[in-house]
């Protein structure tokens, strides 16, 4: 696609529910990053992929968070048993080359856990 | 992990004024990028600048990797420059994988 696409744009869920956030990177982009951004803060690294391989998941807060990119393109970030503290903007970025290089961000998914 | 500090944290400018934003980082980096987050929340890549100087219109950036800092210059500021400016560095923590870490941000408000 022309840009990084994330869906849904907004997600409101009840505490305890599972959510799946989708990221469709720019076509041909090899690396894909997930970030979380709280209001008034900078993006916080969660995890990233080169192709389908998850290279670093050190930023995932706990084992309720997981991510996959099975075919090296679309990625899904899943949060199980959501808690209110999970509320934030979740951002996806992609880059053409391995190792970050120039990152292009999607518009994000605003998650609200009630 | 690597620490990325930006200064000043907040800045108010009169339209037409110039400014310099600074990004300091605590360890060696492979590259550095500057982003603008506009009031609608979009993150726009301004510069990919591992070293040296680049210019794009009224904006320019300089990175001195050996001294672990980068500067973003905004000249003749406009109200559309308002928002938050982030620098982001790519480091190579133990394990050999690259990781992009964002700084604390500079919130800029340009008033007419």
Image (cartoon, coloured by chain):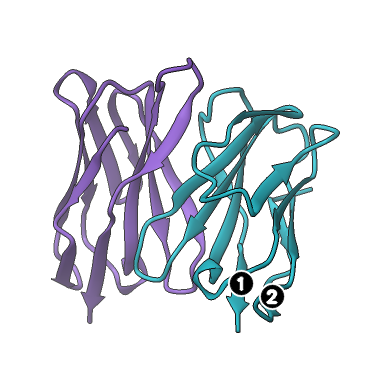
Chain colours: A cyan, B purple
* Side (left or right) of A78 relative to B2: right
**Residue A25 located left or right of residue A113:** right
Question: Residue visible at 74% across and 66% down?
Answer: A18
A20 left or right of B35 in image: right
Which of the numbered marks, if any, corresponds to residue A92? none
Q: Name the residue under label 2.
A: A11
Q: Earlier in the sequence, mark 1 or mark 2?
A: 2
Q: Name the residue under label 1.
A: A111
The reply, left or right, for residue A71 in relation to residue A83 is: right
Where A63 sits versus A16, above or below? above
User: CB of mark 1 within 8 Å of CB of mark 2?
Assistant: yes
SS under mark 1: strand
Q: Vertical placement of B80 versus A44: above or below? A: below
Q: Where on the picture, by quarter, is residue B9?
A: bottom left
In which chain is the residue bearing label 2?
A: A
Percent position of residue B59, x then y:
30, 48
Q: Which residue lies furthest to the right in this view?
A: A71
Q: In this view, does A10 lie above or below B29?
A: below
In percent of width and height, residue B74 lies at 23, 53
State the SS at label 2: strand
Which residue sits at x=41%, y=21%? B92
Q: Which residue is drawn at 34% across and 69% down?
A: A40
Chain letter belonging to callout 1: A
Front-most of A93 and A54?
A54
Marks 1 and 2 sit apart, C-alpha to C-alpha, by: 5 Å
| Residue drawn where x is 32% and y is 32% of the image | B1
Residue A45 image offset from top left, x and y in percent: 48, 45
């Amino acid at each position: 696609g022309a840009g990084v696409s994330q869906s849904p744009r907004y997600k409101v869920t009840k505490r305890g529910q599972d959510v799946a956030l989708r990221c469709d990177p720019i076509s041909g982009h090899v690396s894909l990053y997930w970030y979380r951004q709280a209001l008034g803060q900078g993006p916080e690294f969660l995890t990233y992929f080169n192709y389908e391989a998850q290279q670093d998941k050190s930023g995932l807060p706990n084992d309720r968070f997981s991510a996959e990119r099975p075919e090296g393109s679309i990625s899904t970030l899943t949060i199980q048993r959501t808690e209110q503290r999970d509320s934030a903007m979740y951002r996806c970025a992609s880059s053409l080359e391995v190792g970050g290089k120039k990152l292009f961000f999607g518009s994000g998914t605003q998650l609200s856990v009630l | 992990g690597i620490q990325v500090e930006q200064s000043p944290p907040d800045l108010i400018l009169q339209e037409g004024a110039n400014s310099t934003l600074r990004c300091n980082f605590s360890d060696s980096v492979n590259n550095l990028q500057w982003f603008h987050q506009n009031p609608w929340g979009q993150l726009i890549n301004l510069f990919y600048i591992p070293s040296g100087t680049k210019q794009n219109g009224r904006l320019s950036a300089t990175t001195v990797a050996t001294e672990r800092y980068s500067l973003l210059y905004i000249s003749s500021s406009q109200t559309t420059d308002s928002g938050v400016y982030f620098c982001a560095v790519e480091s190579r923590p133990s394990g050999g994988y690259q990781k992009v870490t964002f700084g604390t941000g500079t919130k800029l408000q340009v008033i007419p």
